Amino acid sequence: MKILVVGKGGREHALLRAFDESPEPTDLFCFPGSDAIAEIAQPVEVDGLEALIEWMGVNDIELCVAGEESYLVKGEGLANLCEEAGIPCWGPHKQSAQLEASKEFAKRFMERHGIPTGGAVAAGSLAEARAAIGGHYPVVLKFDGLAAGKGVAVCLEESQGEAFLDEVFVQKRFGEGRVLVEEFLTGPEVSIFAAVVDDEYLIFTPARDYKRIGEDDRGDNTGGMGAVASRRLIPAATLERIEQEVVAPTVAGLRSENLPYRGFLYFGLMLTPEGPKVIEYNCRFGDPECQAVMPLVKGDLAGFCLGGAQGELRSDLLTFDEGWSVCVVLASAGYPAGSRSGDVITGLDAIGDARVYHAGTKRSGDDWQTNGGRVLAVVAGGVDRKAAVDAAHVAADQVRFDGMQRRRDIGILHFETT
Ligand code: AMP
Ligand code: GLY
């Protein structure tokens, strides 16, 4: 099967490895890909979405998979254009991907379908935002658009709120757009992934990511410094409640509003004292949660995604390992404020049974060098959490590069729900 994955990071590397390990032979391509991905999937060099669709048509691609989200909402939308071209696509149509692209759209969708989430008011100006906040802190401010992970500010006090509003409405750092003023929620976070095929779904292994750069969840927000995944991450009763109160009504809501959806749908949840509430939807798998979850997925992921893209939920093709998986991210010097490239990476051949997925590396002769903020994800599994934590951290200890940043509490911190 000829499969093309859109994206270039650690998540796409993990998806492509899983496709590569599917029982049917695969011929893999990636747009734009990376040097590491090129070892298993041929990079496609075209300029833009329309050219990509044409390339896929000419090259008989049988399945297009949206690893990252941006092309889902660019131009006419990746999935919409694939449909016109007759190419099965695992990833939703542009109108459905508004669940991720517009926080206001997502909030109104949840309100219409009674899906638990924090209360929120939309504001189109500095004055409206201040009025909506009404001096009540803490509050959460969210720019209503894709902002490369920088569009959310959890503001414990007024100075933080004012600083974010200045970025949005005065400096216009993210371009034109409104802000959602949202109720501040508390509780552990969990990421739930459903493979959605029209009115059906299959829930993958739950995961938790670690967003802050520093141990004990201190310091700046990042793209994710690690993740832990297991069926046992949260109690079965909690997962059941999430399915009944969040996943099922979301899938039914998409159907009732004629929003076509075939692809992964990510529910970012907070387990508040009143129950699970949705913080965000993403129309793709999580990064770095994907790197932790994929090694637990057994069976034929390629066949599963193709079936789904063609409208058939093939749950029979997959099983999920009952163990645990821990993903430790190794980030470059200066991340997340900046990043440094060109540091030589050593120890990659000493990680034993662990897996390593490349997020920001490049080849230089026989060496791998850093090439971005998040550089590598080292992933290992175990029958229980401790075994997976130990294996992942021991493997991560083998890898070195100058200025490397890494959290040693990945998989350890936050276990109050288990
Ligand atoms: P997001 O970019 O939507 O994933 O949000 C980034 C982070 O902000 C989340 O992982 C939460 O830790 C935090 N956050 C988002 N919404 C809320 C909320 N309503 N209350 C408290 N924290 C939130
Ligand atoms: N792990 C957070 C995300 O993928 O958005």
Image (cartoon, rainbow, N blue to C red):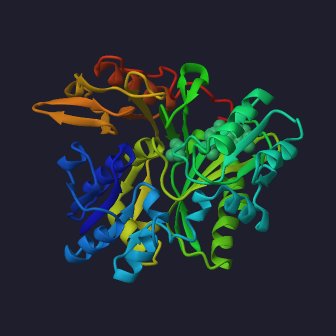
Image coordinates for residue 193, horizontal then vertical, percent: 54, 54
Q: Is residue 163 left or right of residue 40?
A: right
At a point 75% along the width and 60% down the height, the residue shown is 115
Q: Is residue 301 left or right of residue 1?
A: right
Question: For residue 29, what is the image quadrant?
Answer: bottom left
- Tell which quarter ligand 1 is in: top right
- The one nearer the camera, 212 or 395, is 212
Number of marks present in the image shown: 0
Residue placed farthest to the front in the image?
170
For the question of whether residue 117 can be seen, the reply is yes
- The one nearer the camera, 248 or 81, is 81
Q: Quadrant of the N terminus?
A: bottom left
Q: Say above or below: 405 vs 125.
A: above
Image coordinates for residue 84, horizontal then vertical, percent: 39, 82
Q: Quadrant of the C terminus?
A: top right
- The one nearer the camera, 11 or 35, is 35
